Amino acid sequence: MCTACQSNQKEEDVKKTTAVTKIVEGADGQKLDSILTPYLEKLRNLSDNNAGLAIGITKGDQIIYAHTFGYANIEANHKADFNTVFHIASVSKPFTAAAIVKLVQQGKLNLDDKLIAHIPDFKMKGEAYKDITIKHVLNHTSGIPRHVSANDWEHPKPLQANLQYVKNFELDFTPNTAFSYSNSAFDILGIVIENVSGVSFEDYITTHILQPAGMHQSTYIKPKDSLPATWAKPYSYGLQTQEWSPYPYAPNYYPSSGLQTTLLDMCTWGMLHAGKGTYNGKTIFDKNHFKLLTTPYYKTPWGDHIGLSWFLQSYLERPIIMHTGADTGFESIMYVYPNEEISIIVMANRDFSRTGRIINAASEVLFDSVPKNYNLSARYKFTEAYKKHGIDKAKETWERMQKDTTDIYFVNNDDILTTGAVLENGNYWKETQDILTYYLTLNKKSTYAWRLLGNAYLHQKDTLKAVECYEQTLAINPNYEKGKAALAALKNK
């Protein structure tokens, strides 16, 4: 489809769904709305969450329940709706797998082809990398380390940069001898798709997967220096829901985590998988090739299996194919129940949105089980006490809740660290200082906490205490590079 045609189609889709936030169809939809909706509202209230949440449930070729909650952009007062575009992180991986299977269906490659056959420039230390096949990457048995480059969202690179990142690493193990989830391997797989198809990674998936399926609001492309009005902003939770910076976007991570999409588009994706490659009369994969995606290829460490990117598990004693996704500021999760032709998608633009509990609750309601009670981090009670009464009362609250095992709250000291880290990201320097100082009474050996505390002191003009904190990181770990960099930056001022 031409670019102008795509633009017109997107505008028409937007007009059809403007400001729509809810669909309820049939008896199952009514049941979900009467039980699941208040369940979600209570969970969001208890976790102080006013950011966006989108959930869609399909059966056959019909959406039976779809609902958005909260705000895509809190500061602009923009509520999440069916036009809201969410970053779905690793739920992008099945789209990359789908592109590979489409190329197989087109006769352009085979799953057992070696990476070096399609990427002559692909090199790593040692010789074992030469035996990595496309299938090894798709079922996470390639041995390529999980992260050969940090998630550097502030300095986006082109897809080909992944070859430079990986060349100085050795495999973690001989291909096809172990399972180890690898984002970096998937990012290299995007180069295979480009080299075999002769077009860019994003153009191939748009032309052969997204547009034929009718997913017209899904894209990999974000404007360079702005966030479109319909896109959800990333949020995390410090003392309240706060914006997270930077937005998780970089072309070199498109294959592993780069798709931006809407609730209705993901419902279409779910119906396509529930229909084994066909949705609403449109066949994207014939059944034999679709089966490649969901054939169990390798056993995972937790006793289930993996297909081509999809994890093959079960819930409520029913088989599911599933994938999760999380980048700071966003969460996503998808289940497909193939025997029941049901799909569920949950997306959120805030950390700690409990999307896993939400999708399981939706399953429980659908299959006539009572939704399980949720547990919540005691951080919400800690932050509530801090906001009302200060750090001393917050500490007292935390220590009291450590001894209380009778309520829905659980205590994990690292949640205090997370709270401090989120506050540091948002430049709340005094609050960061208060909370990380307390955390370091619980764990004196955290180089991360000492460094962030140093940043808080530095931004409050207390250079001496900042230096003490940075030096403490090196006392714990002399090789801690970020501690060295912080001290070097001070000396160069």
Image (cartoon, rainbow, N blue to C red):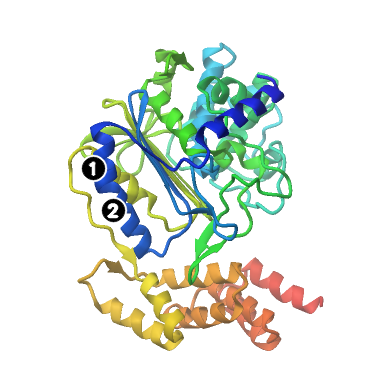
Whether residue 94 is visible, yes or no, is yes
**Amino acid at the residue labelled 2:** Tyr
Q: In this rendering, would 104 be left or right of 122?
A: left
Disc 2 element:
helix
Asked if 180 appears above or below 113 in the picture, the reply is: below
Q: Residue at x 45, y 83 (%)?
A: 441
Asked if 3 appears above or below 77 in the picture, the reply is: above
428, 229: nearer the viewer: 229
| Residue wearing tag 2 | 39
Residue 139 in percent (x, y) is at: 45, 33
Q: Residue at x 42, y 69 (%)?
A: 415
Residue 58 in percent (x, y) is at: 35, 31
Q: Residue at x 50, y 69 (%)?
A: 238
| Residue wearing tag 1 | 365
189, 11: nearer the viewer: 11
Q: Are marks 2 and 1 in contact (CB under 8 Å)?
A: yes
105, 226: nearer the viewer: 226
